[in-house]
Image: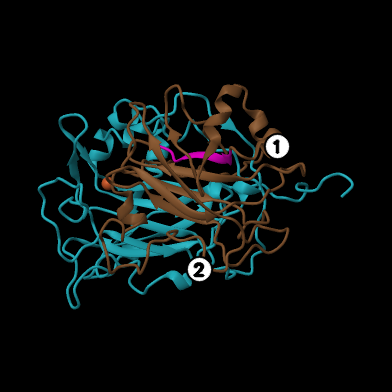
């Protein structure tokens, strides 16, 4: 018999359930006095470099109803395209930008909202630049394995046209599901879990 | 969050192993009714990791308060404690290569001993415990170990089919080194007969994967006359070595 790879299996995912906010954003869930603030509630400060933007949207189910119990996390590069991460080998990211945000959807309206900056471009594996984008991760009751997707910017037509990831989408009519719409100073990005407008989700 | 370096280990920059989607629950699991309208129906776009998935934020131990991993006391009035069977949960966070993963942010939440959550939308008749909030967090040490103290949560009924009960469980969120390593799961207790009747557990296709979420009673780690211990290990995605990657020919 040959040697064994001795690999372990990843722990199986389970739904975050209806009360994910107790664990991940307890202050939002009205459990106060345990943590001083909810993690991921603020991504920027006065000194953060880059163009300030607001991203808001909804996570919408197959009956066109926004989820009021979801949790959305985002991860993005700073204004010069660097990640605030130990695995970032190309330089040091803006120390005044965390790059990571976490937001529960509103219990009444289902809206999520992030105050952040527009990310710079990050290279793909072969060195070509990807278009500015933000990685999204969505968990909620009824979602058995957290869903990954990317948000791009509709007003970055030239960059989007040469983005190597967007280029992988076979059905071009689905590309717009990843494009945030410009809306005043901000962008709106709705995530559709299923149906005709289903967002392109990633197996990353 | 802080940029503080957590260990002397060189940061790893390899892509994560592909997720085994036959091992995880599929999105559409009609026995768990809420999944029906919340499950994507189209094929996922498979992507070998780019920098956007390989990187992730760092959580420094400095964010932690002294009682963050002590659910018996972190919400209780001074001198009081939560009601219920006192337990310690401890374990090792590893990756698929069997390496301990340091600096993993673990967040956990659970119902109280009667099976009731402290939440505005919770409707179960079991009483709230004024000294129990139900949330806690910790960060794994340099070798990937963690522990917490809590009370054993009760099982609870939930609206799905007419008579569905969740086995006693603790929800865990794990935040490892890369954003693509993000995982939420649940810990069950060895010997609980409800495990095999639960439609949420049943979303997991493989019995072995379910056993992998079932914590085992650990008498050696039990504190006599105080708290029983359960051991619960968590496995996160492994990643490739970067020896021959991230370098273009000629560069
Ligand atoms: Fe639960």
Q: Any mark on residue A158, and which? A: 1
Q: Are marks 1 and 2 on the same chain?
A: no
Location of mark 2 (residue): B60
Q: Which residues are magenta?
A: A144-153
Secondary structure category for the residue under label 1: helix
Residue A163 visible within the image: no
Q: Position of residue A119 (x, y in %)?
A: 61, 51
Q: Give the residue at x 41% y 64%.
A: B138
Q: Position of residue B139 (x, y in %)?
A: 45, 64
Chain on which label 2 sits: B
A47 in magenta: no
Give me the chain that's brown: A
Left or right of residue A177: residue A107: left
A151 in magenta: yes
**Distance of mark 1 from mark 2, alpha carbons?**
39 Å
Q: Colour of chain B?
A: cyan
Secondary structure category for the residue under label 2: loop
Res A34 quadrant in image: bottom left
Categorize mark 1 by other alpha carbons within 10 Å: few (<14), some (14-19), many (20+).
few
A173 up-or-down from B217: above or below: above
């Amino acid at each position: 018999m040959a040697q064994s790879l001795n690999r372990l299996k990843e722990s199986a995912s389970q739904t975050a359930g209806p009360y994910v906010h107790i664990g991940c954003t307890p202050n939002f869930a009205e459990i106060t006095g345990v943590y001083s603030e909810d993690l991921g509630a603020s991504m920027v400060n006065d000194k953060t470099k880059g163009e300030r933007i607001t991203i808001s949207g909804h996570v919408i189910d197959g009956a066109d109803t926004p989820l009021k119990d979801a949790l959305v996390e985002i991860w993005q590069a700073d204004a010069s395209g660097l990640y605030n991460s130990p695995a970032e080998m190309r330089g040091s990211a803006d120390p005044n930008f965390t790059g990571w945000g976490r937001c529960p959807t509103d219990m009444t309206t289902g809206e999520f909202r992030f105050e952040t900056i527009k990310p710079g471009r990050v290279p793909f594996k072969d060195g070509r630049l990807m278009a500015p984008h933000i990685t999204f991760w969505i968990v909620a009751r009824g979602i058995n394995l957290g869903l990954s997707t990317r948000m791009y910017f509709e007003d970055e037509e030239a960059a989007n046209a040469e983005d190597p990831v967007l280029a992988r989408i076979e059905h071009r009519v689905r590309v717009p599901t990843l494009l945030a719409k410009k809306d005043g100073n901000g962008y709106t990005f709705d995530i559709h879990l299923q149906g005709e407008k289903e967002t392109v989700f990633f197996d990353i | 969050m802080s940029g503080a370096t957590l260990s002397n280990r060189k940061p790893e920059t390899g892509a994560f192993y592909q997720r085994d989607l036959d091992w995880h629950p599929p999105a559409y699991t009609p026995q768990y009714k809420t999944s029906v309208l919340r499950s994507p129906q189209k094929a996922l776009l498979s992507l070998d990791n780019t920098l956007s998935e390989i990187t992730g934020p760092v959580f420094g131990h400095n964010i932690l308060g002294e009682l963050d991993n002590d659910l018996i006391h972190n919400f209780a009035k001074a001198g009081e404690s939560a009601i219920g069977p006192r337990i310690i949960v401890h374990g090792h966070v590893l990756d698929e290569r069997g390496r301990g993963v340091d600096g993993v942010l673990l967040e956990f939440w659970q119902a109280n001993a009667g099976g009731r959550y402290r939440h505005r939308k919770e409707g179960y008749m079991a009483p709230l415990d004024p000294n129990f909030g139900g949330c806690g967090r910790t960060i794994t040490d340099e070798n990937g170990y963690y522990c917490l103290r809590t009370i054993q949560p009760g099982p609870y009924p939930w609206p799905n089919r007419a008579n569905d009960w969740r086995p006693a469980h603790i929800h865990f969120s794990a935040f490892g080194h890369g954003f693509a390593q993000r995982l939420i799961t649940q810990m069950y207790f060895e010997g609980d007969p409800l495990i095999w009747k639960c439609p949420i557990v049943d979303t997991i296709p493989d019995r072995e994967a379910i056993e992998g979420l079932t914590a085992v009673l650990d008498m050696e780690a039990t504190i006599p006359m105080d708290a029983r211990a359960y051991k619960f290990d968590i496995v996160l995605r492994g990643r490739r070595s970067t020896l021959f990657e991230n370098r273009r020919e000629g560069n």
